Amino acid sequence: MSERLRAIVEQLDLAPGDRVLEIGCGHGVAATYICERLTGGGHLTAVDRSRKMIAAARTRNAEHVAAGRAAFLVAELEALDLPDQRFDKVLAVRVGLFHREPARARALVEPYLAPGGVLHAVFDAPARSG
Ligand SMILES: C[S@@+](CC[C@H](N)C(=O)[O-])C[C@H]1O[C@@H](n2cnc3c(N)ncnc32)[C@H](O)[C@@H]1O
């Protein structure tokens, strides 16, 4: 697991009933930390454009998927189609589009934000060794 991703998820200040969208979930490590905090009917929708990453994230979070707490979808943010869904928190960690074209990425997320919803985009540097 990852202390770095745990700390990022803590910054979301999740409430147990929050509806959360994660863009570029990778292996689903942050997703696990998110789901552990959604104990009051909250739900995570996590997307990644890589089929392989979504398969790994689903396996890692099988218990949360089975409980109806999380869904993992193969999707690119630029083509995301989640009609009528709104989220209280949206998280993207190290997803290039948010770094290269932040205004465009924000515009793509905005239709999915519930009133008062918040987007957290984090582009932290990889840990250095040596
Ligand atoms: C550097 S990895 C970070 C994974 C994870 N968020 C983390 O911090 O460990 C970036 C991930 O975002 C996905 N990704 C990149 N651009 C994307 C986009 N436009 N829409 C959906 N997923 C994207 C990649 O497939 C990859 O799994």
Image (cartoon, grey):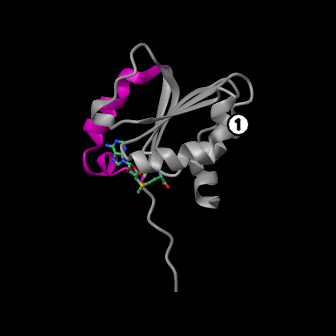
Residue matched to label 1: 37
Q: Main secondary structure of the magenta part?
A: helix
Please tell me whether residue 81 is drawn above or below residue 102 in the rendered image: above
Residue 46 in the image: state x and y as whole percent. 49, 36
Q: Amino acid at mark 1?
A: Arg
Which quadrant, please, contains the N terminus?
bottom right
Residue sitting farthest toward the top: 84
Residue 48 picture quarter: top left
> Is 38 a magenta residue?
no
- Give the percent coordinates (x, y) of residue 32: 64, 45
Q: Secondary structure at mark 1?
A: helix
Which residue: 74% across, 29% down?
A: 39
Residue 107 location (% of width, % of height): 29, 30
The residue at the point 74 percent across, 24 percent down is 40
Q: What span is colored magenta in the figure?
A: 94-114
Q: Nearer the viewer, residue 13 or 31?
A: 31
**Residue plotted at (64% across, 52% down):** 6
